[in-house]
Image (cartoon, grey):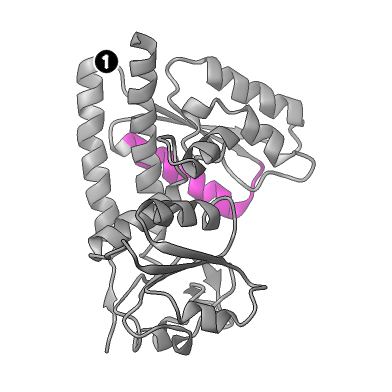
Amino acid sequence: MTAKIIDGKAIAEAVRGEVRGEVQRFVAEHGRPPGLDVVLVGEDAASVVYTRNKEKASNEVGMRGRLHRLPANTPEDAVLALVRELNADDAVDGILVQLPLPKGIREPRILDAVDPAKDVDGFHPVNAGLLASGRPGLVPCTPTGCMRLLAEAGASLEGARAVVVGRSNIVGKPMAQLLLAQHATVTLAHSRTRDLPAVCREADVLVVAVGRARMVKGDWLKPGAIVLDVGMNRGDDGKLCGDVDTASAMDVASWITPVPGGVGPMTIACLLANTVKAAYAREAARRA
């Protein structure tokens, strides 16, 4: 068996096309574009690239994208003041605070200050609670993208055994909730799970998000499993790689995401989709 590749780049481009159409409809109905504001504190090299890409992507689909750059020594209260200013701005539909924040700034305090209706990252406790209770809200972008990838691969989730390796609030926990909502039987595992390879071998669908280069080997997989590799690491050879050893997994899995070009492109595409969703919800609430 040789696994088929799930082309995240192509699927993300399709999502961007859908968003572009929704943005055009929103502008026609409301006379303004949806607005996405990204806050970057500090000069973390990866964050600088990510935030520029988010600003560029939002403008490319017709939104009003705007990046706010603050120096690393910005006081926590000044960051809070900016978030509150964006909360009060009716032209802003989505607010994203780029993580990680510099030392001395408490991430929970900043993220909790974002208006849940504008929380397009889906990190606010209100949105996390809505997801956990099966109610509509804004869902973190990477797990949302993973669900689209599974749909494109034709995954039958009802009754399937799904294993999520990684328990972060950004990927692992919301991913498990989304799979449960599709009637999968879900195990949420992590790096300290006893006999993790055996747990992974139970999975019809395996999602790996632990941040350890090539940790999951091919002999950890159930033959025919669908594997989503959320990791982005530098291997010993200096090359980008995921949390799954793709070379050995290709001989066992039925479908697999590459790194790069798999899950990664979906994150920004789903951020754009969340912003349009937030814009429509805010307009509907205003008119209610």
Residue at the image position 24 percent from the left and 60 percent from the top:
152
**How packed is label 1: few (under 14 Cα within 10 Å), some, or many (20 or more)?**
few
Q: In the rendered image of this protein, does residue 196 appear above or below residue 182? A: below
Q: Provide the major secondary structure of the magenta segment.
A: helix
**Residue situated furthest top in the rendering:** 287
| SS label for mark 1 | helix
Residue at the image position 29 percent from the left and 81 percent from the top:
3
Say whether residue 233 is visible: yes
- What is the x, y in percent for residue 30? 27, 15
Indicate yes or no whether the magenta region holds residue 45.
yes
For residue 197, which quarter of the picture? bottom right
Q: Give the range drawn in magenta.
A: 42-59
- What is the x, y in percent for residue 101? 68, 44
For residue 286, which quarter of the picture? top left
- What is the x, y in percent for residue 273? 34, 39
Quarter of the image that includes the N terminus:
bottom left
Residue at the image position 25 percent from the left and 66 percent from the top:
153
Instruction: Judge from the rendering whether residue 8 lies leftward or rightward of residue 93; answer left or right.
Output: left
Taking depth in this image into account, of 49 and 192 the one nearest to the observer is: 192
Q: In the rendered image of this protein, does residue 145 appear above or below residue 112? A: below
Residue at mark 1: 30
Indicate yes or no whether the magenta region holds residue 156.
no
The residue type indicated by label 1 comes to: His
For residue 22, which quarter of the picture? top left
Say whether residue 72 is visible: no
Quarter of the image that includes the C terminus:
top left
